[in-house]
Image (spheres, helix red, strand yellow):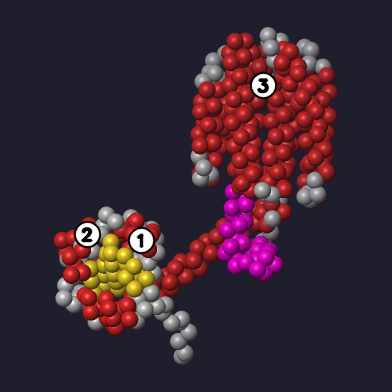
Amino acid sequence: MKNTLPEPAFPTRLLLLGRPEAWLCAEWPAVETALGEAGCTVVARATRHSLVRDALESSPQALLLWADTPELSELLDGLALLSPAPPGVCIANTAERQRGPGLGLQVWLSALPSAEELLQQLRWAVWQAERHAALQAQLDDRKWTERAKGLLMAGQELDEASAFKLMREAAMHAHLRLGEVARSVVRAAEMAEALNLAGQQRMLSQRLVKLMAQRAAGIEARRAKVLQDESCARVDANLARLQALLTATEAVQAVNKAWATLRALLVGKPTAAILTQADAAAETLLTVSDQLAGAIEAGGASRPLQLVNLCGRQRMLSQRLAKDALLADLPQAGAHAAGMAAGLSAFEAGLLELEAAPLSSAEIRASQALVRDEWLRLLRSLRDVQGPEAAAGLARSSELLLAQLDRLTEQYQQSLQLILG
């Protein structure tokens, strides 16, 4: 059977690792000269302490480690700091050779060979490393593909064969490997999820104060307390997931800090003074959550992500409007009235933008119609907030609208245009 494996690569840049005196033996100069004549040049001579710097500056293609047993462990520890380490050969007579492959040392020799043999061993080390990297890439591609298939199957209600076919066709159309498309699918889904969660934090900041106002006014107080506790748990779960999804955690930490301030005000019976403090703390949480959502959207830079963010903002406005109406008796009633007027205009404008967006499906359009219906009901409730019965109707309308907006946001998050965009 014909060997189809590629010819081992020829390393032209070699880094030496070991104590300086190790390279002063009588045999080494002749070996180094022969390597140079064959095209393999020593580009750096590193010790444990200079290894990372020398490797970054010289960009070696291969490494030769030569050490006695007492110093080998220390040199291997230094090599472990270099990630990824270049493939290499180790000359040492020791039992520590089991650490070699994990550090890029593919060949282990007990003595310095001839220049010709050393060159062959270096070539073999490079080939082994490239082969291992290729196999690892295939395994990684399979893992990404399985994850991407699962997302498509869940979000688009596809069977496994259809989900795979969809990704394969996308890869052919974009001239990409299937693994690259799979990675893009997973990352797009994670970005959309993170944006949805950040949007939820904006909404929850307003919902929590709205529920506090309900409790203070005795409007379905028991149910409001249950929803308040559920909202607190939702904020905690969202923050934990955001920390797992996002590598830049400063913005998440800002949300965490603002949330801690608001949460401390949710304990006990909400008085007028506590409500005022909680409202201010909720505004801070809203601001930092909005900044986080904006950063996530900017990182994705796609129209579907903008729609996820816009839809999430509508959720926040639905709760803010109800909150402002219920806080109308506080000393800052004028500010809440002005907030309501701005919120009404902003919600209607956002709803019109969502309805006009071309990236929609029949399911999304049906949800948009339900959102419009609930919005009209909330408007009717906002016109008459006098008396406990009207206020209770307002509270219920805001929750029904929120439920429809939650569903619509999830549909945008799982849309095919976003996942494969």
> How many residues crowd mark 2 within 10 Å: few (<14), some (14–19), many (20+)?
some
Which one is closest to the eye, mark 3 or mark 2?
A: 2
Measure the C-alpha gap from mark 1 to mark 2. 19 Å
Q: Give the vertical position of 197 relative to 153 (above or below).
A: above
At horizontal 45% and vertical 87% (from top left) the residue drawn is: 3
The front one of 278 and 45 is 45
Which one is closest to the eye, mark 1 or mark 2?
A: 1
At horizontal 83% and vertical 43% (from top left) the residue drawn is: 356
At horizontal 77% and vertical 31% (from top left) the residue drawn is: 347
Tell me the SS state at disc 2.
Answer: helix
Instruction: Please state the horizontal and vertical placement of residue 148, each as a whole percent of the image.
Output: 60, 58
Tell me the SS state at disc 1.
Answer: helix
Tell me where residue 326 sits by quadrant: top right
Q: Does the magenta segment cover residue 189?
A: yes
Which one is closest to the eye, mark 3 or mark 1?
A: 1
Q: Does the magenta segment cover residue 319?
A: no
> Which amino acid, by three-letter code, is at mark 3?
Lys
Q: Give the vertical position of 3 relative to 224 (above or below).
A: below
Q: Which residues are magenta?
A: 163-190
Q: Quadrant of the C terminus?
A: bottom right
The answer to whether residue 226 is seen in the rendering is no
Of mark 3 and mark 1, the one earlier in the sequence is 1
The residue labelled by disc 2 is: 73
The residue labelled by disc 3 is: 210
Q: Main secondary structure of the magenta part?
A: helix
